[in-house]
Amino acid sequence: MRFAAITVAAAALAAVMPFAGVSVYAGTLVYYAAYYLVLGQAWNMMSGLTGYVSFTHGALAGIGAYTAVLAINGGWPITLALVAAVAVTAFASLVIGVTSLRLRGTAFTFATLFFQELLLLGVRKLPAAGGAAGTTLQEILPTSLPHVLMVLTAAGATIAFALLRRSRTGVRLLAIKGDEDAAAAVGIDATRLKIGVFCASAALCGLAGGIHALFIASLHPESVFSVDTSIVALAVPLIGGVETALGPVAGAILYVGLREILQIVAPSLHLVIVGLLILLVTLFLRDGIIGAARRLLQRRRTYRAALETAR
Amino acid sequence: MSCLEAAGVRKRFGGLHAVDGVDFTVEPGELVGLFGPNGAGKTTLFNLIAGAYYPDAGTIRFGGDDVTRFPAFRRARLGIARTFQVVRPFRALSIMENLLAVVASEGALSRTPEQDALQLLAGVGLADRANDPAGSLTLGMLKRFEVARALMVQPRLILLDEPLAGLTDGESAMMLRLIESVKVRAAVVMVEHNVRLALPLCDRAVVMEQGRVIAQGTPAQIRSDPAVIHAYLGDTPEGG
Ligand SMILES: Nc1ncnc2c1ncn2[C@@H]1O[C@H](COP(=O)(O)OP(=O)(O)OP(=O)(O)O)[C@@H](O)[C@H]1O
Ligand SMILES: [Mg+2]
């Protein structure tokens, strides 16, 4: 597994940054790339493989964030708080999944949009979660902790995606995306697989959200459940390339870089430009940057081979 | 015990009785030809047997179990496999992945799915295309590929919907040999418009028209049945 080795090496490098005297600014950029990479891989598992588009992966991370903060403020140790973040988020995803993934087509997508709005409304009205004012982590933690955890989670998510894509389960998910009737005709239980992968994908978002709460320390419903994060979660794989483990890696790095530039050049246009980028990539590259790069390499290889034989 | 027993099945689309009270049985190891003009309800009957639709009335028993309300994937896992009139590969997946996506029927779980798949692909002359995307194959290849994918289910009953449609003469000959070899593994129901080529392979033939069975019997009986000649065989050029 050369791919896993490279991923682990890259993660180790990124993880030691806070301890190696790298500037806080650079460390923060790497942290956000890792955070969006986890969300992007989670989206890639569900929507990239099955074709059922989710607009709620950011909100799922928000559930994880709120769960972690409430648990830690309630006196739970951090490990248990993160476990709770995963469990609560996975359970919440079952509510969406069981109701809408039995159906074909766009029901799921609408359910995720609805869920996103419903959560924001609900959390704003919930006194236990701090209501509209939000809530703050009472414990003060060094940011190196969430940094290391997020980078490791990102590496784990990337390797997990690569393994899933290669497994028979991954192939079955792609079969569902291709033709759900034909998939059923060869014995694939589409409903169960869709719900299962959505739940796993949500668990990953819950973990990322829980870790992210340690990083930002204060949660406001408007920003935690903003649809912006959900759009980033889908932009990252769509720009980089869905169905591949490397796509979201390229997408996350590009997105974080782009956002930095845009914050200086055109701060209010940032999501518009991301939307435009998704449009351009899907129109002209189809399978994202990684897909296009692969095709280019392939073409050069065939060209070289043709040159060899011509000689 | 019969392999398949459909009794009194009906399926309506709006006001149209696509399948209008059909009794249809298949014995283990049998190859049954299902014939009839366009719109007779043959594909709809396949969809009812495979579970793509549920019937409005009637029961479907498979291997003695009542599967009338079983979803399609569950029937596949019991051992009903099919091909489609218009081929339906998973185009983005390689041929090999298409076969690996299959969930083998219960009790037929294999420890070596890759080897099984390669063997089946060799059997349909596609071993060298295993790693090509399914979308890159010709129609003739895709028709044979669908038979291999259906066999990957390890079925007890296989439904072939117009396996010869759109094939060249050479490809048809290859497909007919393939169907004969499939018959050794499972009971077969074959829908075909090319009666001249298909009928000689059949142990038994059933003829449908307007959602009903109008005749059934041995190939010889079917050839000389006046109702069949009137309804179907007489009108089609390949029918002679
Ligand atoms: N999903 C559907 N919705 C509405 N009508 C349908 C549907 N499927 C089939 N029909 C109609 O039911 C009738 C039977 O169709 P079916 O496809 O079963 O015929 P067939 O015997 O397979 O014909 P062919 O030889 O042309 O394939 C036709 O009139 C067809 O138009
Ligand atoms: Mg038909």
Image: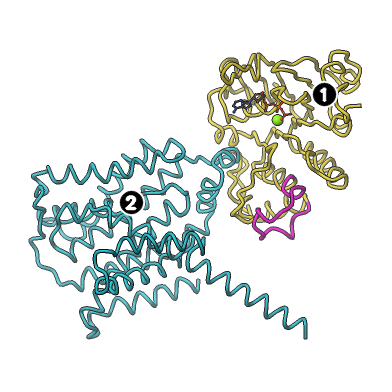
Chain colours: A cyan, B yellow
Residue A50 picture location, percent across and down: 47, 49
**Where are the magenta residues, as a range?**
B125-143
Q: Of the residues shown, which amino acid type is indicated by label 2?
A: Ala
The x and y percentages for residue A226 are 23, 53
**Is label 1 on the same chain as label 2?**
no
Seen at 10% across and 58% down, the residue is A136
Q: Does residue A74 appear anywhere in the picture?
A: yes
CA distance separating discs 1 and 2: 53 Å
Identify the subunit bearing mark 1. B
Tag 1 residue: B204
In the picture shown, does residue A230 fall above or below A107? below
Q: Quarter-wise, where is residue A215 in the image?
A: bottom left
Ligand 1 quadrant? Answer: top right
Query: Is A154 situated left or right of A289 in this image?
Result: left
Marks 1 & 2, CB-CB < 8 Å contact: no
User: Does ligand 1 reach within 8 Å of label 1's beta carbon?
Assistant: no
Q: Is residue B215 left or right of residue A223?
A: right
Badge 1 element: strand
Identify the mark at residue A202; answer none if there is no mark.
2
How many neighbours does mark 2 have within 10 angstroms: few (below 14), some (14-19), or many (20 or more)?
many
Q: Residue at x 56, y 19 (%)?
A: B14
Quarter-of-image position of residue A149? bottom left
- Give the chain of mark 2: A
Q: Tell whether B98 sits left or right of B70.
A: right
- Cβ of mark 2 under 8 A from ligand 1: no
Horizontal and vertical percent position of residue A252:
36, 67
